[in-house]
Amino acid sequence: MLLTVALVIGALIAIAIMANKNQAKGQDASPHTPQAMSDGHKPQPDAAPDRATWQMTLPDTPLGRSLAAAFVRFAESRIRIVDQLNPPASDDEIAEFEKDLGLIMPEEMRALYKIANGQKSPFLVTYVDGGPNKIELPLTLPEGHFVGNLFGNYEFLTLGDAKKEWDNWRVIIEQSSQEELDDFDDHVSADTNGGVRKQYANLKWIPIAKDGGGNAYAIDLDPTDQGNIGQIIVIGPDEDHRRVLAPTLADLFARIGGKAIELDDGDDQRFYFDIEE
């Protein structure tokens, strides 16, 4: 059974959670299969659905159910995050990402990117040679509505941007001596009892969301014995304390879905909140 979320572009957010009937009609009901919105046509796995017509399909799993609850909270606060999400990553994009990093995604991370390949940033920047850059919203907003980030103050990264963030950490590791790396490690603390290694950088930490200062939420593929593979941790140059944000993505989105979203920062068109509070 699948949960579906209908994306409504340029109108009030409408979230519908329903049983997907395609399985009864003989169509592929895999949790990793995006469904077309209007005519029931199932796009090929590597086809890029049109942004105005694709329909998000949520698996009937802890991740899918917690995301559905979180989307309701976003809608209550008039944050148009559902409209900001990109179409799902293709199987080829995921395979290329894994090849580039030399890592295999945990199944829950794979499921998230088969739902949406990151989001459109609240700040759509057009770089202008010889002049000020143009900063716009990613959507046309009705009055009283906002754009924001799926992870509160942290922007949900596309696989391409996640690769760039991971590369930044790779460069630090590869261009630093062991003595320098040890010194970096000495300047961070860690919730080791919670399962995070006391390290400044680790190539088995995959960034999936970022703030504007180089800090990230990352999928941890190298926890201590007290941790869980796939746990979400906080890393970055301004985040001196390495800690577990949530044991799973499902737990993290359940936290959002479990209470009203409260404004932490933003402006009259952008709404940010602290996912850790």
Image (spheres, rainbow, N blue to C red):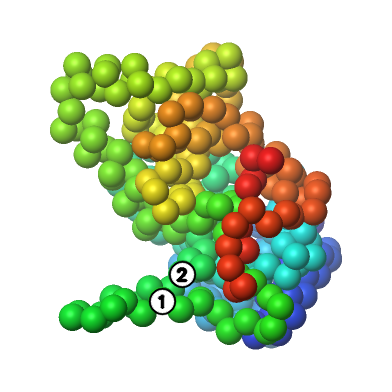
Q: Residue at x 52, y 16 (%)?
A: 192
Q: Quadrant of residue 158?
A: bottom left
Front in this rendered view, residue 61 or 11: 11
Query: Looking at the image, do the residues carrying marks 2 and 1 touch, with CB atoms under 8 Å apart?
Result: yes
Specify the farthest residue to the right. Answer: 18
- The residue to which callout 1 is attached is 135
Front in this rendered view, residue 90 or 240: 240
Residue 39 percent coordinates (x, y): 69, 85
Residue 72 percent coordinates (x, y): 78, 62
Compared to residue 111, the image places residue 80 above or below, namely below
Q: Residue at x 83, y 66 (%)?
A: 18
Q: Which amino acid lies under the numbered mark 2 shown in the image of this protein?
A: Phe
Q: Residue at x 49, y 20 (%)?
A: 190
Front in this rendered view, residue 58 or 257: 257
Q: Secondary structure at mark 1?
A: strand
Residue 268 percent coordinates (x, y): 62, 73
Q: Can residue 4 be seen from the camera position used here?
A: no
Q: Earlier in the sequence, mark 2 or mark 1?
A: 2
Residues at marks 2 and 1, CA–CA distance in whole angstroms: 6 Å
Q: Which amino acid lies under the numbered mark 1 shown in the image of this protein?
A: Ile
- The residue to which callout 2 is attached is 123
For the N terminus, give its image quadrant.
bottom right
- In this rendering, position of residue 119 left or right of residue 104: right
- In this rendering, position of residue 90 left or right of residue 69: left
